[in-house]
Image (cartoon, helix red, strand yellow):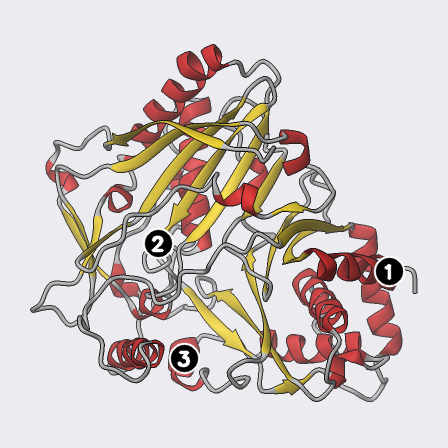
Amino acid sequence: MNPSVTIIHVSQVTPSNADSSESLMTLPLTFFDLLWFKLHPVERVFFYRLTNATRSFFDSVIVPKLKSSLSSALSHYLPLAGQLVWNSVDHKPSIVCSTNDAVSFTVAESTADFSQLTGNEPFSATQLYQLAPQLRVTEDSAAVVSFQVTLFPNQGFCIGVTANHAVLDGKTTTMFLKSWAHTCKQPNNSLPEDLIPFYDRTVIKGPPEIDTFLLNMWHSAAKMFAGGKEPENPKSLKHLITPEIDPDFFRFTFELSRGNIQKLRERLKRDQPSDSKQLRLSTFVITFSYAFTCLIRSRGGDPNRPVGYGFAADCRSLLVDPPVPSSYFGNCVSSIFSKPLTAATFMAEDGFLAAARFISDSVEELDGNVAWKVMKKYSGAPFGSQVLHVAGSTRFGVYGLDFGWGRPGKVEVVSIDQDTISMAESRDGSGGVEIGFSLKKHEMHVLIDLLTDELKN
């Protein structure tokens, strides 16, 4: 019998200061926001093991505490309860806040095996989709974020978050979740300074034509997806691509321990020619290069087929004139794409070294001129290529989110498909990296064998 999720109720949670004059705010999207404007929302699920989580305890303690603290946390993050709109007279969309704003909060119960979802074996991806809430998006307005808390009786519960990427990047989403967790666990303590959002959009500087360039890019993409027809509503807020749920897909989390990463680092140092440019062997470069190489090899096929990669880079520390605080609210990430590559490069014996060289060079290119480089970054691998992307980061600290019932037993990025992986720090705090994969079952077994065997070399 397939596990099911039953919706208990759906409510609206308002910020605790919803009636104050401060609740009126309008934030225009910046070019960093427009970069991600039409992409599918980002969905995450945080699992908490709690064996005394009966339905009675869930209804009387867990849900009320989460809702009350969510309301308090939202008072510092009013745009999360607002709406994304694109008025006819405006050149670009804005986030508009008003006194009637609220976020959707779903309460549900699941019959799934909590241990399977938080364990170390592959499981059907369809079980995760039911744990992430829907995000309301229409032609004229779109919600910013939605939440769902799901009970697994006598096993634990999970918190699902769906975020509109046009408004939030991973850093901002995680910063809010840390604020919510802090408020839930310590309701009488004020928020630490580093969790109070910075809203001044004037610190984001870019070429004067960049907004128009990005909006035209999305318009062209919408036209392509419509078979060459002009979009009926050029200012529609609906996302271009809504991935279909494939029942054949499985999820698996592979952990590279701190020792594994050091071993791979030493291998790359040993294999690198002495007269070549030194590689930037950060944890990210090593982990992404390893996952990229194994995925290309596991798919096999024509060695001349086109491949590539892309990743998002946080630009808060790169922009210095003016400086952008780490607590900046909104997107402040740029997309980095490889040049067109072929699978043969990474299927060869030195494929891992080749991947590390390319990805190291991509990271080295990041600097304070990122805004001026954005318009030159969209000429990567041909359509239909195997292009690997990354969601998440080891720097977010997602395993530190304690709402008062302990740290998460597992964190999953739901919104990844077969050409996207997720990254997070190891849940045990040992300095390793968790890599999340989503593949068809037979492909997953091939990949797992490769990931394991390559570490033995």
Mark 1 crowd level (few <14, some 14–19, many ≥20, 10 Å Cα): few
Instruction: Describe the element under mark 1 as helix, strand or loop.
Output: loop
Residue 310 in sight from this viewpoint = yes
Q: CA distance from mark 1 to mark 3?
A: 36 Å
Please name the amino acid that badge 3 sits on. Val
Identified at 35% across, 54% down, the residue is 164
Q: Which residue in the protein does label 3 denote?
A: 374
Q: For residue 277, which quarter of the picture?
A: bottom right
Q: Position of residue 6 (x, y in %)?
A: 43, 29
Q: Are marks 1 and 2 in contact (CB under 8 Å)?
A: no
Q: Quadrant of the N terminus?
A: top right
Q: For residue 268, which quarter of the picture?
A: bottom right
Please name the amino acid that badge 2 sits on. Asn
Of mark 2 and mark 3, the one earlier in the sequence is: 2
Front position in the image: 95 or 157: 157
* Residue 164 disc label: 2
Position of 2 compared to 136: left or right?
right
* Residue 455 disc label: 1
Of mark 1 and mark 2, the one earlier in the sequence is: 2
Q: Nearer the viewer, mark 2 or mark 3?
A: 2
Instruction: Describe the element under mark 2 as helix, strand or loop.
Output: loop
Identified at 53% across, 13% down, the residue is 54
Identified at 27% across, 31% down, the residue is 13
Mark 3 crowd level (few <14, some 14–19, many ≥20, 10 Å Cα): many
Position of 10 compared to 410: left or right?
left
